[in-house]
Amino acid sequence: MSKEFKEYLSKLQTDKAAICLEYLENQAEDIYIYCSYEPEMYAFDVFYKINGQVVLKNNLNNAVH
């Protein structure tokens, strides 16, 4: 991998993590980000660890107080 690609990838990962934390107002213990690129398909998902529980994005309102 070239240094330029590694720097670009690191910046993208940092930005995604920052957006996820900002959305939850820093209430998550951990953030798990899944990204996949396959020919003709892109996939992205995120889930969190909040209060010791794994929380999917569709259940965030129930987990955050």
Image (cartoon, rainbow, N blue to C red):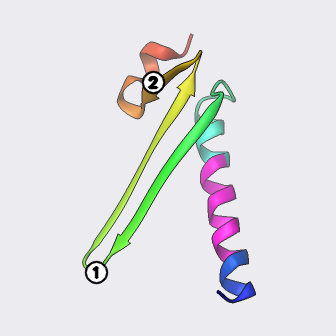
Q: Mark 2: which secondary structure?
A: helix
Secondary structure at badge 1 equals: loop
Which image quadrant for residue 37? Answer: bottom left
Residue drawn 54% across and 16% down? 64
In the rendered image, residue 60 lying in the magenta stretch gets the answer no
| Horizontal relation, residue 19 to residue 43: left or right | right
Q: Which numbered disc covers residue 39?
A: 1
Q: Amino acid at mark 1?
A: Pro
Q: Quadrant of the C terminus?
A: top right
Disc 1 packing (10 Å; few <14; some 14–19; many ≥20): few
Q: Relative to the observer, which residue lies in front, 63 or 53?
A: 53
The residue range painted magenta reads: 8-17
Which of the two marks, 1 or 2, is nearer to us in this view?
A: 1
Note whether 18 is above or below 40 in the view shown: above
State the CA–CA distance, disc 1 to disc 2. 31 Å
Q: Is residue 39 above or below residue 41?
A: below
What main secondary structure does the magenta stretch of the protein show?
helix
Q: Looking at the picture, which amino acid does disc 2 mark? A: Leu
Which residue occupies the foreground of this view, 52 or 44?
52
Residue at the image point whose x is 69% and y is 67% from the top = 10
User: What percent of the width, then of the height, locates residue 33?
Assistant: 51, 49
Q: Residue at x 75, y 85 (%)?
A: 3
Name the spot of residue 60 as percent of width and height, x first: 45, 24
